[in-house]
Image (spheres, helix red, strand yellow):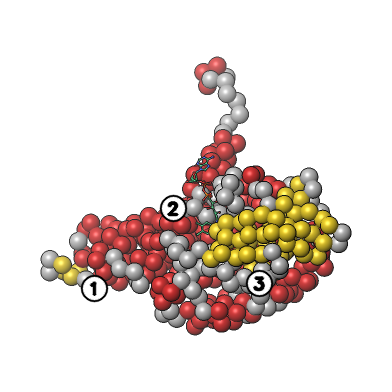
Amino acid sequence: MADRLAAAVAAVRSQVGDRADGWDLAGLIPEPVLRELGAAGLLCAQVPAAYGGQGLSSLLGGELTAETGRLCSSLRSVQTSQGMAAWTVERFGTAAQQRHWLPQLTGGRLAAVGFSESAAGSDLSAISTTVRADGDELVLDGHKRWMTAAHYADLLVVFGRYEDGAAAVLVPADAPGVRIERITDPLGCRAAGHADVLLEGVRVPAGHLLGGAALPLPLLVTTALAYGRMSVAWGCVGILRATLAEASRHAATREQFGRPIGAHQLVAGHLAELLVAEQVATRVCEHASRCWDAGSAEQVIATVLAKQVAARSAAQAAATAVQVLASAGARDGGVVARAYRDAKLMEIIEGSNELLGLLLAQHALDLAPKDLTPKEER
Ligand code: FAD
């Protein structure tokens, strides 16, 4: 398994090289890069080998995600979307659907996942996209917002209302009635192919409904989001590693007042802060991934914690790294400026800081001693 991770990391490094800043400025990742990584199963590396995947554990898949995030958060965003699509098929698809769709997702076809709508952001219970059966077809109507990777995608995993519950449906991106409108100027992850997606009377075969039946909406979205959170958390570890390395390199080589700026204690304090952030985020992600690999009941809350810690730390660390580089980091086309823009978005997606804070607070309340009798009266 470790050999497989090493080969995967080498493949991602060779595809990205030193091109991430250029992709960021252009707002696009060259399609051959995505197709080659996709066809090698490296955009959803946790899919089992039986379906053409790399079969990496959550822990090793996480390290691959961190390395991708260290190099290029836009590519990592595409990887998160592809992984989330595959995970949704794995969790909700029938055996036949898994045999049909998973080899496509590990074979070079690209996917995007759509929950969000204009009135359904943090509150996904407000999703209004509809899925209805019409003979042996399904008809979809709705307007999805901010679908990462939709600009590149061949397949869209669309979440909508179905019968008395909800459903996830696989929709070919070129199906009649699908309109993909690229978001050309996102604050960060500029090359991740974000798009709004309009679905007007889109018809797909009934077999594209994952699991073939209505499911509770909270179950559907929580399951898909849990994968996305874990992936984003590891991506943030990558941002932390990139900013730590760049700030340390600069602090060791840039001299002011006759010595390297890293020798000035206030700058040294920034470096210590970056190192602590990277180490802490790595440890909480490792813990959460081990919970996934063990199938532990703690998996959900450990993932929320990992995403919360890693995203906040990455956003803070990227700002600190800009401070250490000062004018050297204040121009687009460099690692820390890119990290600064990319990391901020990590505090919004897959559950904002506030929403995850509410989940953690609820967990704290659940853990609180239930005996509310004042101590002196017990
Ligand atoms: P809102 O829900 O309007 O929230 C605005 C603010 O209010 C936030 O700070 C929020 O935390 C806070 N807030 C809201 N409710 C509460 C509350 N109850 N308590 C406290 N604070 C609250 N969506 C997809 O479906 N697929 C994707 O691939 C995808 N990729 C994305 C990529 C990027 C870069 C971005 C920016 C967004 C993406 N999204 C995607 C959408 C994303 O999931 C939403 O932006 C996110 O869920 C927040 O929703 P919102 O932007 O509508 O903010």
Q: How far apart are marks 3 and 1 (CA)?
A: 46 Å
Instruction: Say which label, 2 or 3, has the lower sequence index.
Output: 3
Q: What element carries label 2?
A: helix
Disc 1 CB within 8 Å of nearest ligand 1 atom: no
Q: Which residue is drawn at 69% across and 64% down?
A: 177
Which residue lies under the disc numbered 1? 253
Q: Is residue 188 above or below residue 348?
A: below
Residue projecting furthest to the left: 258
Q: Which residue is drawn at 55% across and 79% down?
A: 31
- The quarter of the picture where the C terminus appears is top right
Q: How far apart are marks 2 and 3 (CA)?
A: 32 Å
Q: In this view, does 222 lie above or below 33?
A: above
Q: Is mark 3 on a helix, strand or loop?
A: loop
Q: Position of residue 98 (x, y in %)?
A: 77, 68
Which quadrant of the structure image shows residue 317?
bottom left
Q: Are marks 2 and 1 in contact (CB under 8 Å)?
A: no
- The quarter of the picture where the N terminus appears is bottom right
The amino acid on which the numbered mark 3 sits, given as a three-letter code, is: Asp
Mark 2 is surrounded, within 10 Å at the Cα level, by few (under 14), some (14 to 19) or many (20 or more) other residues, namely many
Residue projecting furthest to the top: 377
Which residue lies under the disc numbered 2? 312
Q: Tell me the mark number nearer the camera, choosing from 2 and 1.
A: 2
The amino acid on which the numbered mark 1 sits, given as a three-letter code, is: Thr
